[in-house]
Image (cartoon, rainbow, N blue to C red):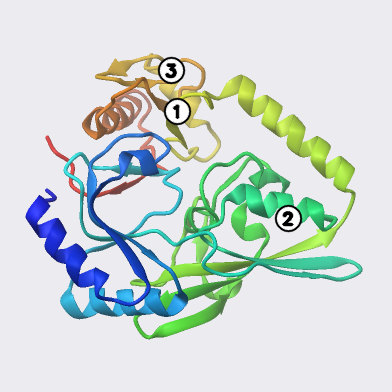
Amino acid sequence: MVEPGVSTALAARVARLEGCEVKAGEPLAPHTSVRAGGAAEALVRPRSPDALVALLRLVREEGVPFTVLGGGANTLVGDGGVPGVTVRVPGDLFPEQVDVGPEEGRLTLGTGSAIVRLVNLMRANGLVGAEFLAGIPGTLGGAVAMNAGTKNGECFRVVEAIEVATADGVGWLSKAQVPHEYRHASLPEGGVVTRVRFALRKGDVVASKAAMDADLGYRKRTQPLSQPNFGSVFTNPPGDFAGRLIELVSLKGHTLGRAQVSTLHANWIVNLGGAAARDVLGLITLMQQRVREATGVDMKPEVKRVGVFLP
């Protein structure tokens, strides 16, 4: 549980670092797409790469709990808040780099940038290849960490390299150096991804836009995009769909507190307004339990849980 006095003391220590903006006891619900959960003991925005490294050094030396919060699109914050330092990498921490040749291009963006920025930059430079990321909420950092994607592709298909900051400095890793799989990437422990380089190709931008528009239209018809949510709750089991299994056990539309299994797509949970994290987590647990009892399938959540969850 985040205590106000403790929050203030930690924030004061972090504030002594040059180039760090810090807020003590900052509510995190507005910083997540599902709009639920408690406060950060200290929410920190580094204003330079050096400031981020200094922050990571302080965290390591003092043994302070450390959490990275991107756009909050796949994150559930506990009602008891998040102890220690919660860092958000600003979208403008690094300048964008565009390198386009006759047949291909490389776009390098900071991980605090919204995913839509990559899509817009791709189109503006006559590039194609990342259409499947269009419409996915959150930041590029979250997209990398979750290897985000759709049935049409995943983030690491177009990633060439990532830059990582640690307490010892900043350096690049090639895609081959970052183990990744369906909806997960094994990032360096204690590190923060700061930039991503994407390798794309020149192509038909008109056809690319048409494909993205068609995909977005389908998502608007089949997903509750107008309500607070964190996208898909579970990864699809091999050869099946999580939404189908949840419908099979009659949980579509089921409500707990102010959280609801979406009536539009059973693999989504929506906040009806004022939902507590315990309600959301209760639904996740119930969905797993019912599906396991009925089918024997153990569903794996895509949602990242951070902080203290109260009973």
Query: Mark 1 = which residue?
Result: 268
- Mark on residue 218? none
Q: Quadrant of residue 152?
A: top right
Q: Are marks 3 and 2 in contact (CB under 8 Å)?
A: no
Q: Residue at x 72, y 50 (%)?
A: 120
Using the image, determine if residue 34 lies above or below residue 133: above
Q: CA distance from mark 2 to mark 1?
A: 29 Å
Foreground tag (3 vs 2): 2
The local crowd at label 2, few if under 14, some if 14 to 19, many if 20 or more residues have their Cα within 10 Å, is some
Q: CA distance from mark 3 to mark 1?
A: 15 Å
Using the image, determine if residue 42 lies above or below residue 57: above
Foreground tag (3 vs 1): 1
> Which comes before the other along the chain, label 2 or label 1?
2
Image location (x, y in percent) of residue 189: 35, 71
Residue 264 shows in the view: yes
Which amino acid lies under the numbered mark 1 shown in the image of this protein? Trp
In the image, is 99 to the left or to the right of 7?
right
Image location (x, y in percent) of residue 143: 53, 53
The local crowd at label 1, few if under 14, some if 14 to 19, many if 20 or more residues have their Cα within 10 Å, is many
Q: Residue at x 89, y 66 (%)?
A: 103
Query: Mark 2 = which residue?
Result: 121
Q: Identify the element where label 1 is drawn.
A: strand
Query: Mark 3 = which residue?
Result: 248
Q: Identify the element where label 2 is drawn.
A: helix
Q: Residue at x 12, y 34 (%)?
A: 311
Q: Residue at x 46, y 24 (%)?
A: 227
Which amino acid lies under the numbered mark 3 shown in the image of this protein? Leu
